[in-house]
Amino acid sequence: MDFLSLTNQSLLTINWLKLANNYQDKNSYQIKEKSYVYRVEKQVTGTPRIPYNLILRDYQKQAVINWLRNKGRGTLKMATGSGKTITALAITTELYQQIDLQILLVICPFRHLVLQWAKEAEKFNLNPFLAFNNVNNWQKELSTKLYNVTSKKNKFLTIITTNSTFISQGFQTQLPFFPEKTLIIGDEAHNLGSPKLQTLLPKSIGLRLALSATPERYYDDDGTDALINYFGKVLQPEFTLGDAIQKKALVSYNYYPILVELTELETLQYTKLTKRIGWELSQDKTRNNYHLTALLVRRSRLIGTAKNKITALKQLMEKRLDTNGTIFYCGDGKIDYQGKTERQVDIVTRILGKELGYRVNIYSANTPLAEREIIKKQLEKGDLQGLVAIRCLDEGIDIPSIKNAVILASGSNPRQFIQRRGRVLRPAQNKTEANIFDMIVIPPHLDRETWEVEKNLLKKEIKRFIEFANLANNCHYATKKLLNLKNQFDV
C-alpha cells in the first residue's frame, strides 16, 4: 500500500461520530457554564485553545459537529462576516484535543488575509508561521519546523500561506513531509478551483475544510465540482445573509438603488457590444468562448465607468459630508472627464477630497501592507472618512468600522456582489445598521432582436438586486424602485 492510500485509510479508522458526539456533549455542559474548558493541563504556547472570553454561536457549533460527522471533510458556506475563521479555528482546537492534530495549514488568496488569519490564530494560543514572499525567507525554516513536529520535538505547528506561494515549487516540495494529522483549510476556497490550483492540492492530506460565502465558481462547473470533490460537500444548514442578520452576526441595512442613464456615446457603444455578445452567444455559450468573455468584460467596464455616475456621486455625497466609515467601490476602467481620460478611481478620489472636502484615501492592490494597516487605523479613528477601492476589498478583509458603501461599479459575477454587501455589514461598537447605495445603469432602448439578448442578461441582474432589497430595512422603498425598472423593461 502506497503512502497516499495508507494515509487515507488510517484517517477512515477514526470514529468520527464519536468525536462529533463528544463535542456536542461537551458543549451542552459548556453552554450552562458560559465558558470553554478543554483540558486541565497547562497549555503549551502554540497549541490550539479556545479563547477564555469566546462563546461560539449556535450555528458555529453546529458547523463543527456537521464537519466531524462528515468524517473530517466539508465546505462551510457561510455569509461574509459570520465568523468562518473562528469556526475553522474551533474545529482545529477540537481535532487537537481529540486526535492530537499536529499541523494546521491555511491557504489564503491574498497577503492581507494571511495577516488577518494570523491575528485570529494568536487569539487561539497559536504561534503561526507565515510562509509567503521570497522563498529564501521561509523555506529552510519551514523545513526545520516540519521536522520538529514529525519528530515530536514540538506538539503543534500552524502554517499560513498565500495561494501563489502554495503552488510554488518551494512549497510543493515540502508537502510530502506533512504528517498524517494535518488539517488543510482553503480560505475563500472558490479561488482554489482554478485549473492550476486544483491540481496541486495535496491528496496526502485527508483532513480538509473549505470556507467561502460563495463556493460555486462563476461559469465554471468543472472547477466547482473539483473543489467539492477535494474538500467535501457543502454542509447543511447553509448560513445565509438573512440568517446572519437574524442571528445578529451581521447588522441590518438600508438599500438605496440609484438609477443612472448612459450618455449618448455610451449608449452607442453599449448597443454595439450587446449585438456582438448576442452573436457570440448564438455560436458558443461555454466559458471557453474567449471572444464572448472579452466582450462581456468590455461591456461590464463600460457600465461600471458610466460618466453619469460621477454626477450621481456628487449629488449623493453633498448631502452626506458629515458621515464617516464609507467605502467607494470603483471600476478599473477610464472615463473622459473634463477634457481628460482618467481612471474612475482617480476622478472619484479627487472629487471627494478636493471638491467636496470628504477625507478619503485610495485602497488598492498596490497599497503596501504596512500602509493598509495605517489607513485602517485612520478610518477607525475618524481621521479618514472613507476609502476608495478597486476589487481588493471584495474578499476577506475585516474593517468593521465601515458602515456605508457606495457601489459605483460591480461586475456580473454574483460573488463580488455578495462579498461587497457582507463587507459593510460586519458588526462594530456603536454600529446598529449600514447603508448601501448601489448605482445601477438603466439599459438603453434597443431594437427587438438586440433587446432579446439584453433581457436574458438583465434578468439575473435585477433578480439579484431584488433579492438584496427584500432583506433591507427599507424593503418597501427599495423593491418598489427596482420593480419599476423590472416592469419598464419587461424582465
Image (cartoon, rainbow, N blue to C red):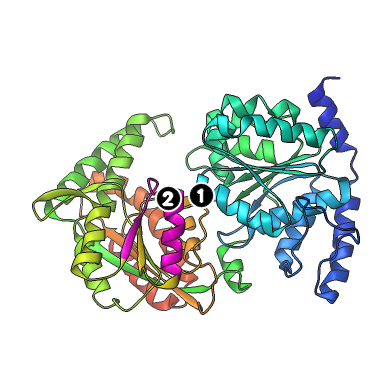
406 relative to 300, above or below: below
Measured as percent of width and height from the top left, residue 12 is found at 86, 37
Location of residue 206 in the rendering, given as x and y in whole percent from the top left corner: 77, 36
Q: Is residue 98 left or right of residue 251?
A: right
Cα separation between marks 2 and 1 = 10 Å
Furthest-top residue in view?
1
Would you place residue 175 above or below residue 210 in this image?
A: above
Crowding around mark 2 (Cα neighbors within 10 Å: few <14, some 14 to 19, many 20+) is some
Earlier sequence position, callout 2 versus callout 1: 1
Q: Amino acid at mark 2?
A: Cys
- For label 2, the SS is loop
Q: Residue 298 location, x and y as percent?
A: 28, 41
Q: Which residues are magenta?
A: 360-380
Per the image, the residue denoted by label 1 is: 112
**Is any atom of residue 491 visible in this view?**
no
Mark 1 lies on a secondary structure that is: helix
Left or right, residue 6 beside residue 126: right
Q: Quadrant of residue 489?
A: bottom left
Find residue 73 and report its image quarter. top right
Question: CB under 8 Å between callouts 2 and 1?
Answer: yes
For mark 2, what is the residue?
392
> Is 97 drawn above or below residue 151 in the view shown?
below
Q: Could you say which is closer to the camera, residue 46 or residue 402? A: 46
Tell whether position 375 is magenta.
yes
